[in-house]
Image: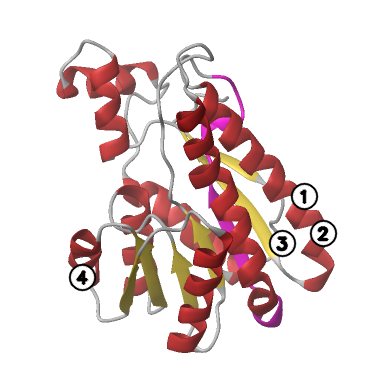
Amino acid sequence: MNVVLVTGASSGIGAAIAIAFAEAGWSVMAAGRDEGRLEEVADVSENISTWAGSLEEAEDCDELVADTIDEFGSIDCLVNSAGILPRGNAQETSDDAWRDTMTVNLDVPFYLSRAAMPHLLKTEGSIINIASNWGLEGGERAVAYCASKGGLVLMTRAMALDHAAAGLRVNAICPGGVDTPMLASAAEDSDMDVDSFLAMVAEESPNRRIASPEDIAALAFFLASDAARHITGTAIPIDGGLMA
């Protein structure tokens, strides 16, 4: 049975990815900070195990990978989905906000990829990084987020080149607006109620809709599958045409 390790799995995109893989028969290690919400995700399928804790340090990431190997014996796919989005321009962004964003959005995917790589090389597996369309273009009042996601995109491409000959694939998914708690929280920065804000985001999309977490999960599952065996080093927008 194939094994996937998913971070940020307690809600939103990460939860949808964990559930999609589990329902397809994969064994899933769902990692996140909120133990209660992780248990709700695990209730969906007996194929989901959970790991609750912080991943701020390299040692934490090493522990998560080791626990996944202890549980399942191998790893076929790592999905780095955890992320944070503090709003602010350069003058508004504190040292702590900058460092926290880089830690969660860039350092942790690197630490986890490094720790999981020996196991992924054995299985000729894949790494999938959940980046953002704001990792491909700038966004207003999101300087730390854009910097971190842009770094994640180029880290994806560099790792893909380094390990393609060994059979390890590395790709990034770059969503636009997705109907998640993170997007809803952005309404607080807009002087709009949540419903009006989400309607505005949908109207700005060429296809006039907001992606669901399940839309992102479907792409992640494809990238992890043998059908995508010739795809590596990509950063794929999934944004209703915003980047067209």
What quarter of the picture does the C terminus occupy?
top right
Q: Which residue is mark 2?
A: 162
Position of 181 with respect to 151 (left or right) is left
Where residue 185 sits: x, y (%)? 26, 29
Check if residue 130 falls in the magenta segment. yes
The local secondary structure at tag 3 comes to: loop
Classify 67 as above or below 134. below
* Crowding at mark 2 (Cα within 10 Å: few <14, some 14-19, many 20+): few
Which of pointers 3 and 4 lies earlier in the amino acid sequence? 4
Which is more toward the observer, 183 or 205? Answer: 183
Q: Which residue is mark 4?
A: 44
The kind of residue tagged 2 is Asp
Q: Which residues are magenta?
A: 121-138
Give the colouring mode of the picture.
secondary structure
Question: Disc 2, disc 4: CB below 8 Å?
Answer: no
User: Mark 1 and mark 4: span between their CA atoms?
Assistant: 36 Å
The kind of residue tagged 1 is Ala
The local secondary structure at tag 2 comes to: helix
Where residue 29 sits: x, y (%)? 40, 73
Q: How many marks?
A: 4
Q: Nearer the viewer, mark 3 or mark 4?
A: 4
Q: Which residue is mark 3?
A: 230
Does the image show residue 228?
Answer: no
Q: Which residue is mark 1?
A: 158
The kind of residue tagged 3 is His
The kind of residue tagged 4 is Val
